Image (cartoon, rainbow, N blue to C red):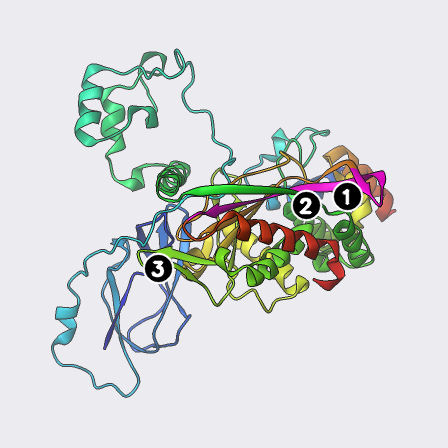
Amino acid sequence: MGIFAMPSLGADMEAGRLIEWLVSPGDAVTRGDIVAVVETQKGAIEIECFEEGTVRELLADIGTDLAVGAPLATIQAEGEPIPEAAVAEQATPVEAEQPVVTAPAPQPVAPIPPQRPQAPAPGVVQSSPAARIKARELGFDLAMLTGSGPGGAIVLEDVEAEKTPQSKRSPQDEMRRAIAAAMTRSKQTIPHFYLSQTIDVTPAMEWLTSFNEGKPPSERVLLGALFLRATVLASAKVKTVNGHFTEEGFKPSDKINPGLAVALRSGGLVAPAIVDAEQMGIVELMAAMRDLVTRARAGRLRSSEMTEGTITLSSLGDSGAESMAGVIFPPQVALVGIGAPGLRPWVVDGNVEPRHLVTLTISADHRANDGRQASRFLSVFDSLLSTPEAL
Amino acid sequence: MTPDEIRTAFLQELTNVAPDIEPDTVGPDDHIQDDLGLDSMDVLTLVTALHDRLGVDIPEADYPRIASVALAQAYLAERMA
């Protein structure tokens, strides 16, 4: 009889609150079935089962906060006898396991609501002596807190509020905290380096225009799907950018599961993965992207999508800044950042022509890559986009 | 459909795509991407919803013509006439 434990929810989340059971004792489950829903800092996440068999007992109650590794249910494999007394014993909480590495959020430009109005001199955090003492005791950085005192000063109450249970904070605050913690850890542990290249996406845009012409909206493809496909194919060629870095070092992944940074309108972002994307063509990738973005915005992602990404793509879309050097999402080792396309002069066959250009940047983990591999990734990506019909 | 009904339908589909937007706060000339923050996926979702609801298939070349409530109202009225 196996214990089905709370799976990892991604490097930047360590716990969640059980809000729904989707199975009952006696139900048959197979790998990949959604068995429960857990509320996390990044919205509700559907927990998938990793074993096959029959659910014998549910070990966690709705409303319980569960750490990664906490037991959720006992699952009896087919043909396995029902043990006599084992169940109660197995139900003792498993030591919560820390997620393998830490995590950042890829797109460093998520809108951050202005929080501290009337801030005094920049860099100076006004606070009461009691608040400073309490913050030191609890190990809080005062600069991370929002003050409710005169002129935005941090008072004892604000520090106290900070240690109240997570549920007291707004979902936006939770999301911001998860991103802050994760990005800090990523930058502290991953030796990032960045390479950029300007690429001409005019052929890709022209190809898309004719591809979409006459198609109903539901069948149209966005430039983002081409970027995703190029990321997958370039990752297949340059294997050192695709995988996970753990205590044992870098392990390239056989599968290519590109994570997609999705900005949420309420603030913050998530980077769920499209699992097993290598076999998907443009149309399938577009459908997968649509589905993923819709569910990310609705706050309904699956546990595997939060943990199985092997590389992340973060694209600024139609308008905005022209380049982006993002923060790698651990345990991954690379993040592809794409700026907004712009019409610029470019030399084509010896003549200057207006062309649609984007700046493609790869943020890479130096423990797994050197400039050579990162540079090769950019050049493969560029050449793939110059012949979009071959994607 | 009257111009008012078209405007209401457009606003409803817009706020379905972006539920955080209060319909009353949307100005007639607010740009759906620059001012209201829709991205290319949101615009495609909006165009798909308008196609389903009004039967108007908006080609990509015409996306700029639905970039605000006022523009969309005029454009959709023309296409539905």
Q: Earlier in the sequence, mark 1 or mark 2?
A: 2
**Marks 3/1: CA–CA distance:** 41 Å
Same chain assignment for discs 2 and 3: no
Q: Nearer the viewer, residue B10 or A1?
A: A1
The amino acid on which the numbered mark 3 sits, given as a three-letter code, is Glu
> Residue A341 got which mark?
none
Q: Is residue B8 in view?
A: yes
Q: Which residues are magenta?
A: A346-366
Same chain assignment for discs 1 and 2: yes
Q: Is residue B18 in view?
A: no
Label 3, secondary structure: give it.
strand
- Majority secondary structure of magenta residues: strand
Q: Is residue A53 magenta?
A: no
Residue for point 84% across, 39% down:
A353
**Residue, disc 3:** A20
Q: Is residue A355 magenta?
A: yes
Q: Nearest to the eye among marks 2 and 3: give it.
A: 2
**Marks 1/2: CA–CA distance:** 8 Å
